[in-house]
Image (spheres, rainbow, N blue to C red):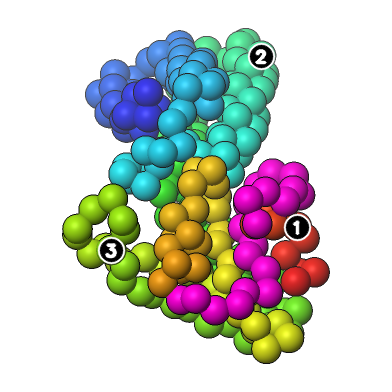
Amino acid sequence: MISLILIFPITACLILFLIKNRALNNFMITLYALIHIICSICLCANYNPMDFKQNLFAVDELNKIFLIVLSIVYLAVAIYNNGYMKDDKSLTRKLRHYSYAVLLFVLSMTGAILSSNLGMIFENVVAQMLKTSGNALYFHEYKYTPKDTEKEKKYEIDFLLVKNKKVCPIEVKSSGYATHKSFDYFKEKYPIKLQERYIIYTKDLKFEDGITYIPAYMTGLL
């Protein structure tokens, strides 16, 4: 699915470059709009958050909304484009360049939305909000050997805050928030008193298993 919506516009541009036809221009733009929205709906309905970090491009809780919005807007542009230019049978250089621009623009936006680096952007946004609230930010990386294995692994805590002379670990999750091994192992490795443990994510406020889950917009309250 992801390969289709990323490869099709490049293929369409090559076809339009070789075959200069007015009707084909409109057809390619409309066809890509339909492919884009169908693939986007399928991806958002069937994505697996556990596989998110294993791919260069993937869908997660954060970017699926942007993907659907882009698909709807692009489909509306394609429909308007066909209605607006239905009486114009000419194929000018500007029109060909317009078609290339639309296809490649949607491709670039789709690539940016589906990029796995979106999680890094989310972390940077959270960091800015924490810093603006007057917090000193610390990052911690540690090695730990879980009880169910003999192999030592590396784990990290996104942010560490100090509240009332106690440590507050914070994890930022754009997807896959159900698992938090780095939190659990951090508590086991360092038998210290923790003020609170926070996970900043994209859903509603809740408290579960000794962890406070905070929606991103409430980050400034920490």
Q: Position of residue 78 (x, y in %)?
A: 59, 21
Question: Mark 2 against mark 1, which lies toward the viewer?
Answer: 1
State the quadrant of the N terminus: top left
Looking at the picture, does residue 32 appear above or below residue 149?
above
In the rendered structure, find residue 217 and report the number of the disc placed on it: 1
Amino acid type at mark 1: Tyr
Q: What element carries label 1?
A: helix
Tell me where residue 211 sits by quadrant.
bottom right
Q: Where is residue 88 in the image (x, y as percent from the top left)?
A: 58, 15
Q: Residue at the location (50% across, 62% down)?
A: 183
* Residue 98 seen in the figure: no
Q: Is mark 3 on a helix, strand or loop?
A: loop
Magenta residues: mostly which secondary structure?
loop
In the picture of the structure, the residue carrying the numbered disc 3 is 145
Q: Residue at the location (55% across, 62% down)?
A: 171
Near mark 3 (Cα within 10 A), the count class, few <14, some 14-19 or many ≥20, is: few
Q: Left or right: where does residue 97 sit relative to residue 175?
A: left
Looking at the picture, does residue 113 appear above or below residue 143?
above
Q: Which of 192 and 102 is in front in this view?
A: 192
In the picture of the structure, the residue carrying the numbered disc 2 is 83
Q: What stretch is highlighted in magenta?
A: 190-210
Amino acid type at mark 3: Thr
